[in-house]
């Protein structure tokens, strides 16, 4: 019976079927948000208010001609999109989505001590797959885009990793669901007895939330950090030679990674799926939608930076602030 239960969790909820369905909603929400800010309608006719447009776009890509350039390294070129899709999908199984009990404990499909490090590693591994996709295409624009991906990774991965570890320091665990449980207990304790150290910790964690959000924009290659795809400079960069099924997998992989990023942001800083009255799954959707709205708004409101501006900004500002944020968390952990 336990085997059947685990299989249902993996294949249906909160596993594969739910995640893939939710990624389509996340793409629709992001596209509608950006369209509103740019005075456009966005997806409109396919399904209610265009909500089925991402699915229609994916199906359309499946029937398009799938081309492998003669100059490409065919094996790497054809396998890279599979990894771009599969790696973040596997990482979502480590994100708490639904409560394992009615009252307490927000354990994901797969959980172990150190799963936070595993999620960060898998997110970085996706970037490596993106680099190989562009580099193996045999196209100069693809190679330039791939090089920019690698350079961006050197800039944002350090502050991203630092602020991601700060909640783990306070919780005393590298397990994501234990960090969520600690946040729930801490918020309840603070509401019962507000203190100055608790207020300071809230401010410090908000700084970590802001830094992490900026780094996620770079991780997702969203404006203003879309230099690796810049269609006005390098004709869609590392994706330039992809079409058909492979391009569909790449786009789906980006959507899965956006849900993964929003889910991790929610788990580390917003209490995961925890919340009053409503079921945990509803809180997960509400909180991750809020994170996707933030990412989409920032992406629409800012123009693209140059790659040197991005790297310089990360090393001159984000890394020092992230180090100070972690130091402040360590100091407050000895007080609270």
Image (spheres, helix red, strand yellow):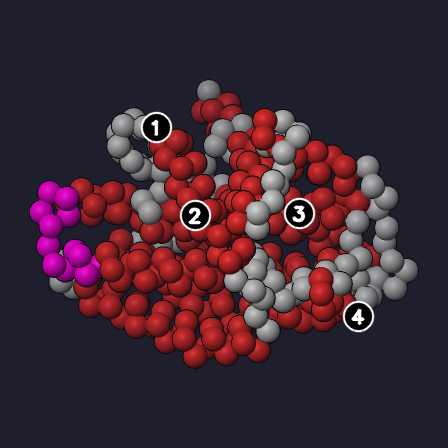
Sort mark 2 into few (<14), some (14-19) or many (20+) by Cα contacts within 10 Å. many
Q: Nearer the viewer, residue 38 or 261?
A: 38
- Crowding at dot 4, Cα within 10 Å, few <14 / some 14-19 / many 20+, comes out as some
What residue is shown with label 2? 291
Residue 291 visible in image:
yes
Q: Nearer the viewer, mark 2 or mark 3?
A: 2
Give the camera-side residue of 30 and 169. Answer: 30
Q: Could you say where residue 333 lies in the image, as x and y percent from the top left? A: 20, 61
Q: Residue furthest top?
A: 1
Residue 189 location, quadrant = top left
On residue 279, which mark appears?
A: 1
Residue beneath disc 4: 140
> Relative to the observer, which residue lies in front, 95 or 325?
325
Pick whichever of labels 2 and 4 is earlier in the sequence.
4
Q: Is residue 13 above or below residue 190?
A: above
Q: CA distance from mark 2 to mark 3?
A: 19 Å
Earlier residue among tags 4 and 3: 4
Span of residues in magenta: 190-201
Q: Secondary structure at mark 1?
A: loop
Which residue lies at the image location 59% right of the left edge and 26% below the top edge? 48
| Residue at the farthest right position | 70
């Amino acid at each position: 019976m336990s085997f059947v239960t685990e299989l249902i969790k993996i294949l249906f909820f909160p596993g594969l079927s739910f995640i893939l369905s939710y990624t389509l909603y996340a793409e629709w929400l992001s596209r509608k948000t950006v369209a509103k800010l740019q005075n456009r309608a966005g997806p409109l006719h396919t399904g209610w208010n265009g909500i089925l447009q991402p699915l229609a776009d994916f199906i359309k890509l499946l029937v398009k001609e799938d081309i492998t350039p003669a100059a490409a390294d065919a094996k790497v070129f054809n396998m890279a999109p599979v990894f771009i899709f599969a790696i973040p999908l596997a990482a979502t199984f480590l994100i708490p989505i639904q409560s394992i009990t009615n009252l307490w404990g927000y354990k994901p499909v797969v959980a172990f001590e150190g799963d936070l490090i595993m999620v960060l590693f898998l997110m970085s591994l996706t970037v490596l797959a993106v680099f190989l996709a562009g580099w193996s295409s045999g196209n100069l624009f693809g190679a330039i885009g791939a090089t920019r991906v690698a350079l961006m990774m050197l800039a944002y991965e350090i502050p991203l990793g630092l602020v991601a570890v700060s909640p783990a320091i306070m919780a005393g665990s590298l397990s994501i669901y234990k960090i969520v449980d600690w946040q729930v207990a801490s918020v309840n304790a603070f509401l019962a007895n507000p203190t100055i150290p608790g207020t300071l910790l809230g401010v410090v964690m908000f700084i970590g939330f802001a830094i992490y959000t900026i780094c996620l924009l770079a991780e997702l290659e969203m404006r203003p950090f879309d230099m690796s795809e810049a269609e006005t400079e390098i004709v869609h960069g590392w994706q330039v030679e992809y079409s058909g099924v492979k391009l569909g997998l790449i786009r789906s992989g980006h959507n899965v990674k956006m849900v993964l990023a929003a889910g991790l942001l929610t788990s580390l800083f917003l209490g995961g799926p925890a919340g009053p009255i409503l079921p945990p799954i509803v809180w997960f959707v509400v909180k991750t939608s809020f994170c996707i709205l933030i990412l989409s708004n920032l992406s629409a409101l800012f123009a693209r930076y140059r790659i040197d501006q991005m790297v310089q900004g990360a090393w001159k500002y984000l890394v020092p602030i992230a180090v100070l944020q972690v130091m402040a968390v360590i100091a407050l952990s000895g007080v609270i």
